[in-house]
């Protein structure tokens, strides 16, 4: 498993920005941290400096509104912010993983933050998870998740985080991955006591990824844990589903890849699993496609059928812009959501390593639309770069436009807007937004928000976007 090493550093002033309280009852929407009915954007800047602590990490929150997000309505949160557990220390990389959900059932969405380099006592780089609680003022104080006592050094616990109602009881649960101690934290949560219970996920070894969503239509979200196995061209994709009394593990032996997202692409009531497989074929993995690909495994009453032929899309697929080239990284980030409001989940795929003209690793994102017959590839597919008319900025080497992507409706118009991480922008990072519309993404009102605009000087902003 190859991961991009974070080497950037920055200095920032910490603190929580208070937002005018919402007048009405909280919305209960996932990702709406201040309960005003508009979903918000949370992004990690995990290698920001906090004072003299290099790569201590920060989370940037942009609050939604009818006009979208803006740097004027933001919060920058670190482990030195009031009410946040812990202390900002070098190498913590607070913000390296993020997930949203209303954990304490108060109608305000909360944010789970991974600090994968957190040290505990004399054990370096163990990793930790923290809940930041939503409120009328947005994200405020926090609570640390119970920490496994037997983790060893440099395990990166919390590198993968997902939320969802995993057992169909109406409460939001949390899972964190890392080392051999992948765990599930069961809701409801309280601000003083944390989760109602927690335990190690059985039958799993080391995994650093997790994807969650309801693929069986029963109201309980499945938890998908991808493994990358040397010498196994199919990889190893395991998922857990709730049977009504216990969790049952199932396998998709023909599936491969990470990261991933779950959305109902064909609107049949079952979530579909989209996996990014961005690595080029090599001697230990002759499968896949040059430049990367995605696969779609369609859900059903028993989950995805392992015998199905998944939809496979890459840049050499007819109708998809571009061409498969080494190190494009097509599939390095994926997200699902309904961009045009037709009821079908659409898919956005990034190729953060895409060259644009002479600009190396400038990056691109590609939009594919859902339909009753599944993911469409023959028409309507469109790619965007920073050289696309109406997109702020220009394509430059090492920008990595698409380092992370997230679809969320920040304008409350029923159409998902696209948040694009650009973690190499000006060597400091940034967040770009494109709005959803009935005809798909539009560049009207597109924004590019840099680290300077959110009072950061550096720190890989845009390497992580909460889903």
Image (spheres, rainbow, N blue to C red):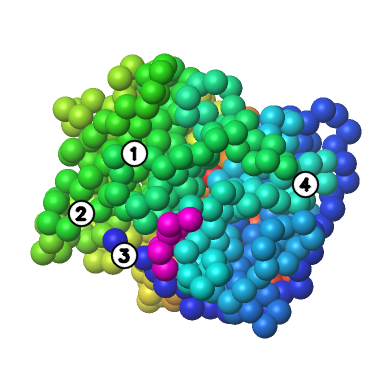
Which numbered disc flags the more N-terminal residue, 3 or 1?
A: 3
How far apart are the two marked residues, 4 and 3, measured between alpha carbons? Answer: 35 Å
Measuring 44% from the left and 44% from the top, which residue is drawn there?
A: 183
Which numbered disc flags the more N-terminal residue, 4 or 3?
A: 3
How far apart are the two marked residues, 3 and 1, measured between alpha carbons? Answer: 25 Å
Q: Name the residue under label 4.
A: 138
Asked if labels 2 and 3 touch by Cβ distance under 8 angstroms, the answer is no
Which numbered disc flags the more N-terminal residue, 2 or 4?
A: 4
| Crowd class of label 2 (few under 14; some 14 to 19; many from 20; radius 10 Å) | some
How far apart are the two marked residues, 1 and 4, measured between alpha carbons? Answer: 36 Å
Classify residue 419 as left or right of residue 75.
left
- Find the magenta span and give its range: 149-158
How far apart are the two marked residues, 2 and 4, measured between alpha carbons? Answer: 41 Å
Q: In this view, does 33 lie above or below 82?
A: above
The answer to if 349 sits in the magenta stretch is no
As helix, strand or loop, the secondary structure at mark 4 comes to: loop
């Amino acid at each position: 498993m190859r991961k991009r090493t974070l080497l950037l550093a920055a200095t920032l002033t910490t603190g929580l920005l208070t937002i005018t309280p919402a007048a009405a009852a909280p919305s209960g929407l996932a990702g709406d941290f201040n309960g005003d009915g508009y979903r918000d954007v949370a992004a990690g800047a995990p290698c920001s400096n906090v004072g003299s602590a290099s790569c201590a990490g920060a989370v940037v929150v942009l609050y939604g509104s009818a006009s979208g997000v803006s740097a004027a309505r933001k919060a920058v949160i670190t482990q030195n912010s009031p009410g946040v557990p812990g202390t900002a220390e070098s190498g913590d990389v607070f913000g390296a993983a993020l997930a949203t959900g209303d954990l304490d059932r108060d109608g305000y969405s909360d944010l789970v933050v991974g600090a994968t380099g957190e040290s505990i006592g004399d054990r370096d780089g163990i990793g930790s998870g923290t809940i930041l609680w939503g409120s009328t003022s947005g994200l405020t104080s926090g609570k640390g998740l119970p920490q496994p006592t037997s983790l060893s050094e440099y395990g990166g616990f919390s590198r993968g985080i997902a939320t969802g109602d995993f057992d169909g009881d109406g409460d939001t649960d949390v899972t964190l991955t890392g080392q051999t101690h992948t765990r599930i934290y069961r809701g409801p949560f309280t601000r003083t006591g944390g989760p109602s219970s927690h335990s190690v996920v059985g039958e799993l070894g080391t995994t650093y990824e997790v994807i969650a969503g309801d693929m069986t239509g029963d109201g309980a979200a499945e938890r998908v844990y991808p493994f990358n196995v040397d010498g196994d061209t199919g990889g190893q994709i395991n998922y857990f589903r709730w049977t009504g009394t216990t969790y049952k593990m199932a396998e998709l032996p023909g599936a491969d890849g990470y990261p991933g997202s779950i959305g109902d692409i064909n609107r049949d009531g079952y979530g579909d699993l989209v996996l990014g497989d961005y690595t080029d074929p090599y001697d230990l993995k002759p499968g896949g496609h040059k430049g990367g690909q995605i696969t779609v495994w369609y859900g059903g009453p028993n989950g995805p059928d392992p015998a199905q032929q998944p939809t496979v899309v890459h840049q050499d697929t007819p109708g998809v812009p571009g061409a498969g080239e080494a190190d494009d990284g097509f599939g390095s980030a994926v997200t699902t959501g309904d961009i045009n409001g037709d009821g079908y989940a659409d898919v956005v795929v990034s190729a953060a390593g895409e060259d644009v003209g002479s600009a190396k690793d400038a990056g691109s994102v590609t939009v594919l639309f859902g339909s009753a017959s599944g993911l469409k590839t023959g028409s309507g597919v469109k790619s965007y770069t920073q050289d696309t008319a109406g997109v702020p900025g220009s394509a430059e080497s090492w920008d990595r436009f698409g380092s992370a992507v997230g679809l969320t409706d920040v304008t409350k118009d029923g159409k998902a807007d696209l948040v694009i991480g650009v973690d190499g922008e000006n060597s400091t990072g940034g967040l770009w937004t494109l709005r959803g519309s009935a005809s798909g993404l539009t560049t009207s009102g597109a924004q590019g928000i840099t680290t300077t605009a959110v009072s950061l000087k550096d720190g890989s902003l845009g390497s992580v976007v909460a889903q």
